[in-house]
Image (cartoon, rainbow, N blue to C red):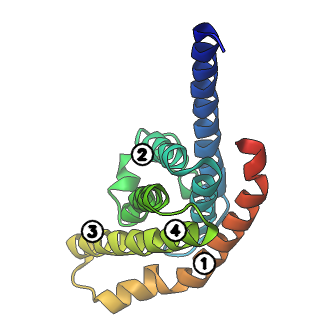
């Protein structure tokens, strides 16, 4: 291949990467709008984050997640309930949204330094989800206590984590299965 052909191929890959990242961010936004309202809404955001990471890989998937968060921060209504704005991120549930980035970072670390097997991908997503829960819960408690007074850790876990564990693990499993089936087309 000539050097001109190699440059064109790299440029095409970069454009293709940007397209995949944009589609990934859009998918996360669309899935965030599919919601069952509760104190912390049940959405398909986590499904989309898992799916985008497995399908696009750690770097592109994390960039898609970052773009989703940034779009929401500047006011584009990409969050649950068609909401957006920096106030959502600084609100009580903002830590869980920011926690999606930790899922991506953990996924990158695991898949870079370990085999890219299905087991490694699943374990990295589960560990990332645990870190997302921990960060989001600490954030929720801090914001809640500023506005409403003391609240216990078990109470917050009962509101914000325990009801979501099984649904999130189901979403994780579905995301991995579906992404692995589509993966050969995206490569």
Name the residue at the front extreme: 1
Which is in the foreground here, disc 2 or disc 1? 1
The tag earlier along the polypeptide, 2 or 3, is 2
Q: Earlier in the sequence, mark 3 or mark 1?
A: 3
Mark found first going from the N terminus, 4 or 3: 4
Name the residue carrying label 3: 143
Q: List the residue tagged with mark 4.
A: 125
Q: Nearer the viewer, mark 4 or mark 3?
A: 4
For the residues labelled 3 and 1, the Cα–Cα distance comes to: 27 Å
- Classify mark 3: residues with Cα within 10 Å, few (<14), some (14-19) or many (20+): some
Q: Is residue 94 shown above or below 18? A: below
Q: Secondary structure at mark 4?
A: helix
| Secondary structure under the numbered disc 2 in the rendered image | loop
- Specify the quadrant that holds the N terminus: top right
Q: CA distance from mark 2 to mark 1?
A: 28 Å
Tell whether label 4 touches label 2 (CB within 8 Å): no
Residue closest to the eye, 2 or 27: 2
Q: Measuring from the top left, give residue 76's x and y in whole percent.
A: 51, 40
Question: Which residue is located at x 41 percent, y 56 percent?
Answer: 105
Question: Which badge, 4 or 1, is on the more N-terminal residue?
Answer: 4
Camera-nearest label, 4 or 1: 4
């Amino acid at each position: 291949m000539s050097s001109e052909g190699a440059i064109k191929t790299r440029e095409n890959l970069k454009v293709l990467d940007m397209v995949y990242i944009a589609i990934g961010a859009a998918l996360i936004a669309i899935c965030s709008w599919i919601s069952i309202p509760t104190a912390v809404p049940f959405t398909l955001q986590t499904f989309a984050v898992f799916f985008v990471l497995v399908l696009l890989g750690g770097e592109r998937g994390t960039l898609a997640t970052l773009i989703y968060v940034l779009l929401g921060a500047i006011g584009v209504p990409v969050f649950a309930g068609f909401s957006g704005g920096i106030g959502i991120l600084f609100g009580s549930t903002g830590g869980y949204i920011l926690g999606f980035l930790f899922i991506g970072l953990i996924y990158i670390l695991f898949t870079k330094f370990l085999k890219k097997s299905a087991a490694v991908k699943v374990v990295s997503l589960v560990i990332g989800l645990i870190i997302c829960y921990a960060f989001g819960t600490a954030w929720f408690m801090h914001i809640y206590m500023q506005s409403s007074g003391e609240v216990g850790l078990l109470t917050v876990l009962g509101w914000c984590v325990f009801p979501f564990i099984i649904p999130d693990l189901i979403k994780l499993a579905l995301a991995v299965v579906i992404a692995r089936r589509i993966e050969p087309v995206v490569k």
